[in-house]
Image (cartoon, rainbow, N blue to C red):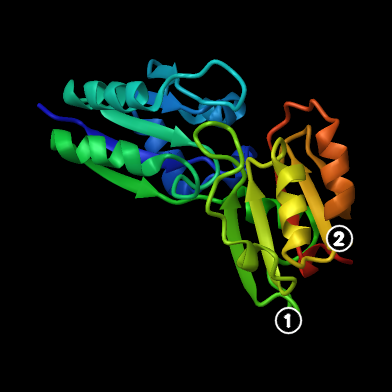
Amino acid sequence: MTGFVSFVSSGPGDPELLTLKAVDRLGRADAVLFDDLSSGPILAHARDGADLIGVGKRAGRPSPKQDHVSKLLVEYAQTGQRVVRLKSGDSGIFGRLEEEVVALREAGIDFEIIPGVTSASAAAAAAGIPLTRRLTARRVQFVTGHDVTGELPEGLDLSALADAGATTVVYMGKRTFAGLVARLVAAGLPPDTPALLAEAVSTEDQRLTRTTITDLAEHLAGSDSAAPGLILYGPLADD
């Protein structure tokens, strides 16, 4: 007997930003495999008696390996249970979704993907600004700030990332942003380009910092903050 897996996107942290479908699947799941950023009040929507298994990965901290998480997901589903794989933000955006989907397909297990509010949208909303701006920011681009080693990814399209007419969102980039900014300025992005650092978006610990890319790079180079955050830069961040 084979179970069924629901990839549930939990949004940026505020349980009120969960979709109705996400709440429904959490309430019917026999087991919930959750990320660190999807814990806390969001898990209150899981039914009584459900198995709750933490499998979150955080930069710079001991974390389960991805192949272990995928194997665990398959094993739970193979017992015939209804399984929720709870991922922060939107599971399709830098959420390692593909590896887990491939593992399920190889095991012959059915699944569904439930989208959610990505932290980029939540950060812009919290700051009271749009992700796009008429005439000045007609394009939005998302990029990850680190690769599997935790370093700045190789092969970045610097001409696109240095486009002053685009809104750029850097996920998981606090530790590597100083290095990225050096490359962006060398590629022609003005040093005074507006930037927004959004930490712990939509939670009680939320903190928004408006600055420029160079000032933010200097700030982050000397910071040891462990709060989850993302960085937005471009014309949208300028009041």
Check the picture and name the quadrant holding the C terminus.
Answer: bottom right
Furthest-bottom residue in view?
A: 135
Residue 6 percent location from the top left of the image:
33, 39
Mark nearer the N terminus (2 vs 1): 1
Front residue of this view, candidates 145 and 87: 145
Disc 2 element: loop
Splitting the image into 4 quarters, where does residue 224 fall?
top right
What is the C-alpha distance between the residues marked 2 and 1? 23 Å
Name the residue at 25% across, 41% down. 102
The answer to whether residue 193 is left or right of residue 100 is right
Residue type marked 1: Arg
Front residue of this view, candidates 176 and 120: 176
Q: How many marks?
A: 2
Residue 189 percent location from the top left of the image:
77, 65
Name the residue at 76% across, 65% down. 234
Residue 63 percent location from the top left of the image:
50, 19
Furthest-front residue in view?
A: 186
Front residue of this view, candidates 171 and 31: 171
The answer to whether residue 175 is left or right of residue 97 is right
Q: Is residue 7 visible?
A: yes
Check the picture and name the quadrant holding the N terminus.
Answer: top left
Disc 1 element: loop
Front residue of this view, candidates 105 and 154: 154
In the rendered structure, find residue 178 and report the number of the disc placed on it.
none
Q: Which residue is mark 1?
A: 134
Name the residue at 37% across, 40% down. 7
In the rendered structure, find residue 191 and report the number of the disc placed on it.
2
Residue type marked 2: Pro
Nearer to us: label 2 or label 1: 2
